[in-house]
Image: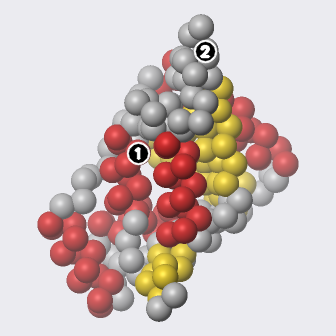
Amino acid sequence: MKKLLHINAAARGEASRTLALAQTEIERICRADPEYEVEEIDLYRNPPTFVDAYAIARRDAGVKAGDFSHPVFAEALRFRDADYIVVTAPYWDLSFPAILKAYLESVSIAGVTFEYTPSGCRGKCKAKGFSYLTTAGGTIGDNDFGWQYVNGLFSVLFGIGGGKRIARENLDL
């Protein structure tokens, strides 16, 4: 089985328009490739811990020793090993909810999801693509800095190309 990792940053849960859009996209992906098994991370039910001095020390020690058994690595390993990633994030304040940023920081670990090389960062993630889904009550236009950030992070740092943005806007107009 292939793993589709769904990172859900929709605060309204089942009432979320963004989550409804994501569920449609996930169903489409799974119909096109029935080998996918969906694994969801609901960031509001299981919030990520912020990266602090303790987490940095544990990460550094684990990477240096080549030992990723400490819980601080669990989400990064799960992210790294996904075959496809779906990010569900409503459009808030020109971007996305802060909880998604905390999650992305928690999985950005040199030696796990990326590595440094003389020519720059090289991604270590398995995924060959990702979808970023967002909805807005008003107009997004060219100001989707959340998409720009996620697309840049995934492609430059994690080595995951093939990003696809699906947005629905003006839903409250």
Q: Quadrant of the N terminus?
A: bottom right
Q: Which one is closest to the eye, mark 1 or mark 2?
A: 2
**Crowdedness near tag 1: few (<14), some (14–19) or many (≥20) residues, C-alpha within 10 Å:** many
Residue at left offset 39%, top offset 36%? 97
Residue at left offset 43%, top offset 30%? 92
Q: Residue furthest front?
A: 142
Residue 27 coordinates in the image, percent (x, y): 74, 38
Residue at left offset 49%, top offset 43%? 146
The numbered dot on residue 100 is 1
Near-viewer residue (131 or 79)? 131
Residue 86 coordinates in the image, percent (x, y): 61, 47
User: Relative to 77, does residue 21 appear above or below in the rendering?
Assistant: above
Label 2 sits on a secondary structure element that is: loop
Kind of residue indicated by mark 1 = Leu
In the figure, residue 35 lies in which quadrant?
Answer: bottom right
User: Relative to 45, does residue 82 appear above or below in the rendering?
Assistant: below
Taking the image as shown, residue 99 lies to the left or right of residue 94, namely left
Q: Quadrant of the C terminus?
A: top right
The numbered dot on residue 171 is 2
Q: Residue furthest top?
A: 173
User: Relative to 20, does residue 82 appear above or below in the rendering?
Assistant: below
